[in-house]
Amino acid sequence: LTIPAGADSKAISAAIWSPCAMAPTALQLGPITVSGVMDCPIQGKALPLIVLAPGGMEGLLAHHDTAEVLADGGYIVVALDYQKEPLAQDFSWLIERPKDAKRLLDYMLNSSPAASLIDPQRIGFFGYSRGGYTGLAIAGAIPNYSGWPITAEQAALPIAHDGRFKVFVIADPVSLFPDKASLQDVSAPLQLWSSQYGGSGVSAESVRKIAGNLQTP
C-alpha cells in the first residue's frame, strides 16, 4: 500500500500481513521467498494490529518472518518500507519516522482495507534499530540531539507521540535517550531486546542504559 504525500510529508510505502484461511504458498518477492497468499481475504474480526518499523535502509520484507508468525497468530501487521531511506548526512529520519508511524496508524484505522476489522484498543508496535528509536519516541521518549549533526530547525520540531499504541517491543534501538529524564514519559508496557554484541551499530551497552533508565522495569 502507499499513503500519498501531504503538504509537509512524504509518501509512505508499507505492506499488510494478516490472518488467512487459505493454505500458504511460496511467494517470490524480488530476492526473498515468503510463505503466504497474495491479497488473501482477512480472516477474523476485532483483530489486534502491530506496526512493524525496520532499521535503516531496510525494506518492508526485512522482518517478514516476524510478520508471518504474528499473522498466523491472529494479528494484522503493517510493515513500513525504508529501503530507500538515506543514511549518510541526513538525519531527517529522527523527526520523520515517528510522524510516519502516526500517519500509518491513522490510515490503518480509518482508510485501509483492514480498517473495519481492527480493534483500536489493541494496537502494538515492533521496532528494530532506527525503528526501535521510533517506538520509544512514539511511546513518549524525548530525544537528546547532543552530538548529532542535525540543524537547529530540525531540533526545534516536535516529536510525534501517540497514545493509541498500547504495547511496544523494541529491539536494538538507536539511542538518543541518555538519561531518566528523556524516558520519564514512557509508561506503556515495553519489552526491550538487545543483541549480545549489539546490532546495526547499536551497542549492547546503550540498550542496557535504556533499560536502566526506564521508569518501570
Image (tube, rainbow, N blue to C red):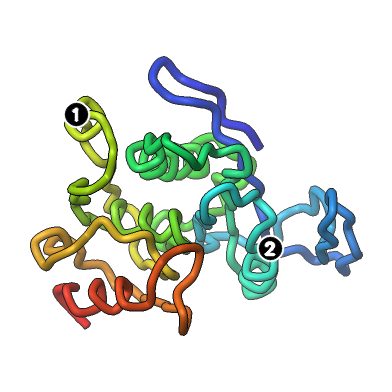
Q: In this view, does 176 lie to the left or right of 59?
A: left
Q: Where residue 152 is drawn, which disc sits there?
A: 1
Picture mark count: 2
Question: Of residues 212 and 71, which is closer to you in this image?
Answer: 212
Where residue 48 sits in the image (x, y, percent)? 50, 63
Query: What residue do we see at 48% from left, 39% from top?
Result: 88
Question: Of residues 123 and 201, which is closer to you in this image?
Answer: 201
Residue at the limit of the structure toward the top, as seen here: 7
Q: Residues within 10 Å of mark 2 (few under 14, many from 20)?
A: some
Three-letter amino acid code of the residue under disc 1: Ala
Three-letter amino acid code of the residue under disc 2: His
Determine which quarter of the picture holds residue 47: bottom right
Foreground mark, 1 or 2, reads 1
Please tell me which of labels 1 and 2 falls first in the chain.
Answer: 2
Where residue 113 sits in the image (x, y, percent)? 64, 41
Where residue 107 sits in the image (x, y, percent)? 50, 37
Tell me the element at label 2.
helix
Residue 27 in sight: yes
Q: Is residue 147 left or right of residue 25?
A: left
Q: Where residue 64 is drawn, which disc sits there?
A: 2
Q: How crowded is mark 1: few (under 14 residues within 10 Å), some or many (20 or more)?
A: few
Where residue 180 sits in the image (x, y, percent)? 11, 67
Q: Where residue 56 is drawn, which disc sits there?
A: none
Q: In the image, is residue 36 above or below residue 193?
A: above
Query: What residue do we see at 42% from left, 77% from top?
Result: 193
Quadrant in the picture for the N terminus: top right
